[in-house]
Image (tube, rainbow, N blue to C red):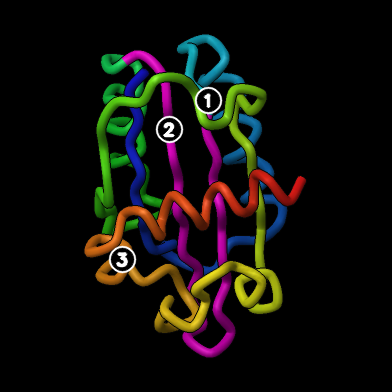
C-alpha cells in the first residue's frame, strides 16, 4: 500500500459549498481508483487564508496519478509533499475521502498543538516532522 501526505494553501478562503464540491468529486474519483484517505481544511481568520493537509493511499500508480491531478488544481497552490512511502495496510480503509473542516479549537485538541506554529498547516514544520502530520491526520480520523 502506497501513500502520500501533502499540504497546500487555498487560493482563496473556501466556502462550505466549494468544499462540498471538492469532497463530492474526490469521493467519486477515489472509489473508481481504489484510493482512500483524509482531507483536512483549516481557515485562519488571523491570516485570512485556508490551508489543506491530505493523505492519499492506494496503489502507487493510482496515488501518484491522483496527486498529479491535484497539483494542476488552481484552487490551491504551494503544494508540498510532506511524506510518501509504503505501509502494510490502509490507515483510512473506510473513507473514500474523509473530510474535516477544522477550526482553532479543533487544532488545540491535537497532541503537540503548540508545536504547530501558526494557525494554518505549517508546511515547514510538517516537512521536518512527518510523524506529526500523520498523527494530526490520525487524530481527526480517530475522533469520528
Q: Residues within 10 Å of mark 3 (few under 14, many from 20)?
A: many
Q: Which residues are magenta?
A: 37-59
Label 3 to label 1: alpha-carbon separation: 22 Å
User: Residue 113, relative to residue 82: is it above or below?
Assistant: below
Image location of residue 79, percent across then percent down = 28, 53
Image location of residue 13, percent across then percent down = 54, 68
**SS type, badge 2:** strand
Q: Nearer the viewer, residue 29 or 137?
A: 137
Identity of the residue drawn at 31% across and 54% down: 130
Identity of the residue drawn at 60% across and 20% down: 28
User: Residue 76, relative to residue 68: is it above or below?
Assistant: below
Task: Give the residue pinned by disc 2.
Answer: 56
Label 1 to label 2: alpha-carbon separation: 6 Å
Residue 41 included in the magenta stretch of the image: yes
Residue 52 included in the magenta stretch of the image: yes
Is residue 96 rendered to the left or right of residue 11?
A: right
Amino acid at each position: 500500500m502506497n501513500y502520500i501526505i501533502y499540504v497546500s494553501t487555498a487560493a482563496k478562503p473556501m466556502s462550505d459549498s466549494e468544499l462540498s464540491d471538492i469532497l463530492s468529486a474526490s469521493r467519486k474519483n477515489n472509489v473508481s481508483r481504489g484510493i482512500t484517505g483524509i482531507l483536512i481544511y483549516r481557515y485562519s481568520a488571523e491570516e485570512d487564508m485556508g490551508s489543506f493537509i491530505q493523505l492519499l493511499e492506494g496503489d502507487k500508480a493510482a496515488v501518484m496519478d491522483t496527486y498529479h491531478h491535484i497539483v494542476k488544481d488552481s484552487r490551491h497552490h504551494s503544494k508540498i509533499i510532506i511524506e510518501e512511502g509504503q505501509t502494510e495496510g490502509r490507515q483510512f480503509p473506510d473513507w473514500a475521502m474523509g473530510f474535516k473542516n477544522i477550526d482553532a479549537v479543533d487544532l488545540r485538541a491535537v497532541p503537540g498543538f503548540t508545536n504547530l506554529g501558526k494557525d494554518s498547516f505549517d508546511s515547514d514544520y510538517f516537512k521536518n516532522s512527518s510523524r506529526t502530520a500523520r498523527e494530526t491526520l490520525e487524530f481527526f480520523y480517530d475522533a469520528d
